[in-house]
Amino acid sequence: MLEGVRIEARVIPGEPVVAFGGFLDGIQRSVVASYLHVTIPVVHGTTAAAVRSRQDRTLHTWGRGPLVERALFLPAALAGRDVMAALGTAGIATYDTISADDAVTGRHPIELIGLARQAVQGRREQAEEQLAAEWCRAERTPLYVDGGIGGFADASRSPHAVGVVKSHHTLYVAAEAVATVAALTAGQRTSAFVVATRKRTRVASWYLRLRDTGDPLGGLVRIEVAEAGFDAARADLVSRWVLAEREPVALPDPRWQVMAYGIRDCEEYLRAVAG
Amino acid sequence: MGEILGRVVATERRPNTPHQFHFWTALDSPVGIGTIVRVEGTIPVAGHLPRIFGVVVEGLSYSDLETPLHDVLGSDGEPGRADEAPTRRTEIRLYTAAVLRHVPDDPLQPVPLGAVYLASEADVAVALRMDAYLTPGANTGIPIGLYRAGATASPIYLDADFLVGPEAAHLNITGVSGLATKTSAVEWLLGSIFAHFPAKKGSVAALCFNVKGPDLCFLDQPATRLDAADLELYARLGVPAEPFANVEYFAPYTARGYSLNTLRSHESLSHNVRPLTWGLREVLQYAEVLLNKDDVDAKADALIDFIRERVVDQDFTDAMLGGPHRVQSFTDLERWFREVLRAMEEKNQEAWRTHHVATIRKVRNRLTNISTRCRGLVTDDGTVSDLPWGAFRDRGVYVVDVANLEEDAQDLIFARVVTQLRERLEKRTLGVDHVVVFVDELNKYAPSDGPDTYVRKMLLDVAERGRYLGLVLFAAQQFRSQVHRRVVGNSGTALFGRMDADELATPGYATLALATRTKLSTLDKGELMVRHPHFTQPVFVRFPRPAVLSGREGVERFPQAEEPTLEQAVARALRPLDRTITLDWVKETIALADEDEVLRARNRTLQVRPDDVQAYFRSQLKRRVAAEQIAARTRPAIRTAPGDDPYAF
């Protein structure tokens, strides 16, 4: 725990404050383009990430524009050397989805598709990480990151990156604290705690209720900021930044209760440019 | 090439066509309805990169919301909160443009995706095909106004060949009253024509019918309200900001006959105001104008023809009538009718020269009644004061003031003046090669419904055939939909000022986009939408205030003279011919004459315009012997009776 000894609901002092200078998001799309040797799926993946910076209340694409990548994702060892060589000669970017040790024949095609999709997701996360790092180096205003920042090597240690997690498949509190999280009302947060996993940087985190919806997890987000320099005042201040982004409402996106408009704009932009 | 303004966009639902395309712009772009833009294609067609010019006819704006309700919910029902949000909601400006021109013209293809630029001045000339008639040495451009969009300010020219003829001709102006559109536009355009009409096309004059108030009564007086913007427009369009140099006014007398029936009656403006009076000869040809079909059946028509061809202006003899008759005036005609009827009664005849007595009585009644119905215009005695037929001057403006006349007199004036113009232009004896005739309130004179009047037939004839003669109709009305289709349809050029919403809802405007119609209903003073044969789409322009005194200001500055006495009326009428004439001289001269005689003498003097005005005027009055003092005769005294006379009493 970074605040107190157990998860508690805390009222955030002060009004929402507009502070974010940019919004980072990424998208990915993957489709099975064909099958090699009858059972080996070839997945075409598209990833894109961008930062939309805010100037005079209007959003613009930041920096050197969106990072868009289109590539084939397939298990190289199973596809065969000839196929990979032909793709390379044709100038088609490829990513291997499986290590040589796991390249045993007879793998289930659906399992292979799942691996390809993970690889696509990895490319998207890399693009996001790259942009987040560039922002934190170049800018002095906070960046609103859609999702957690623990996976970012540099940005997760920067005071300028704020991760906002919308989905709660995993609750980072003990069972007895779930009720406390679920009982948060709009404008309240939990006490902060550390999120630490093997592959991710340790970050300070807390839950924040954006809107009262009647659903225990509705309108609830989890904030991630760098652990270094964290204190209760920073949790309150960052919470006020995030609360300020409740308007304009991100409708008609179905996730509008937890989505900032800047993130919706970024997604729409990426859909437009990545196709 | 300029800064990119927008980008052509096409979707399956909203595709581009050869005649229409869509593009989006930044929120702060200077594009609006009526803006002319240029599209640069990027893929060569037949070796050429296509360039497309278009005019914006529709605009759309929308956000990323699916329903307005989301905005309400997002703002908790408080409209002000949307402005407090840290981010502006995404918004689009999507425009639809109608294609003005493809370069090259062939092959005609749908508008490609490409960058959109604001049209430059040179682009505007190409887009509106003005480049075809603005070529040095063969320039037939007549400035109509200035097109403005963003930093572009481009003069728009009409083609004189299509405005004054012979390729097309005529101009029609529509706009609501009271917003200084119709009359102002015509005054401005006439000035522009006079300044730019190509010398090689000959001479041009204008004849304007002043049909209401003082609208056209001060065309020779300078405007008082031209501001810097107006003067800049005049300079940019190459038209001098001056009133018309050669203007003559014509108006009939009032019914009383003392003064002219016009609001331009101020003495300081009387130098170029002339009476308009006609006698029997001038009127009889247009009897049809004043006589309706109930009046003139075939029999009456035959008698009128007989009088026109065999009686008027010649020595008419008939065994039954005695001595020769010379009919030159309505008074003569009445005398002739009386003689015919008297002779028929004496001989107990029911018909004379195949004309039944009832027909003769009917025609007598209708014809001799004309001078009463059109009193002030038609004279009993045949005095004529007319327009200067045969001596029209180049760049001259002739205003016929019919504003205060009865409908019959107005119709008669229209019919005769326009017929004379047509006949004389046909014979090339008018004095100029082209005449622009301006008629306001066209929906009154050439309505789309109602009886087929002589005036309407005449206006139709001018609209359909005038361009070959150099007779050009500039007509204005508030409701174009109420004007005969053939009149407006034959107008090569059409101007539209601010329009009434009800009028815009009529089918005639269905070809205009809704946004264009909306713009028409909100046009500012001095703004016009122009249709011209060279322009494939209407274009919006701004024109300056006319350089002449407006009617309203004119009557304030030159108030109408009070109804004069007979002596004052004569003095005012004759003084422009002889500045030495005084009121006392008039009083002394007409002291013994009766009113009709004085008015007749005045009219004849004005008609003849003699060198010695006073002598001529005096000669038109009956001579009267001066009174003489007769000395009293001395009468012999009555002899008194002697005192011794016994019979005396």
Image (tube, coloured by chain):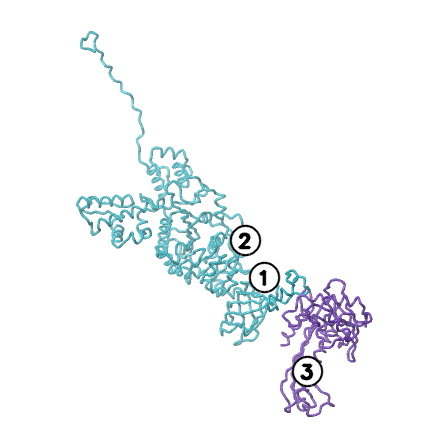
Chain colours: A purple, B cyan
Task: Check residue A117 in the rendering and tell me which mark sits there, or answer none.
Answer: 3
Task: Check residue B420 in the rendering and tell me which mark sits there, or answer none.
Answer: none
Mark 2: amino acid: Asp
Seen in the image, is A258 located left or right of residue B253?
Answer: right
Q: Position of residue B401 (x, y in %)?
A: 41, 48
Seen in the image, is B279 located left or right of residue B92?
Answer: left
Q: Position of residue B195 (x, y in %)?
A: 48, 55
Tag nearer the camera, 1 or 3: 3
Please name the residue that numbered disc 1 is placed on: B150
Mark 1: amino acid: Gly
**Mark 1, residues whose alpha carbon is within 10 Å: few (<14), some, or many (≥20)?**
few
Residue farthest to the top, as pictured: B644
From the image, which quarter does the C terminus of chain A lie in? bottom right
Residue farthest to the left, as pictured: B347
Circles 2, 3 touching at the beta carbon (< 8 Å): no
Residue B549, above or below A243: above
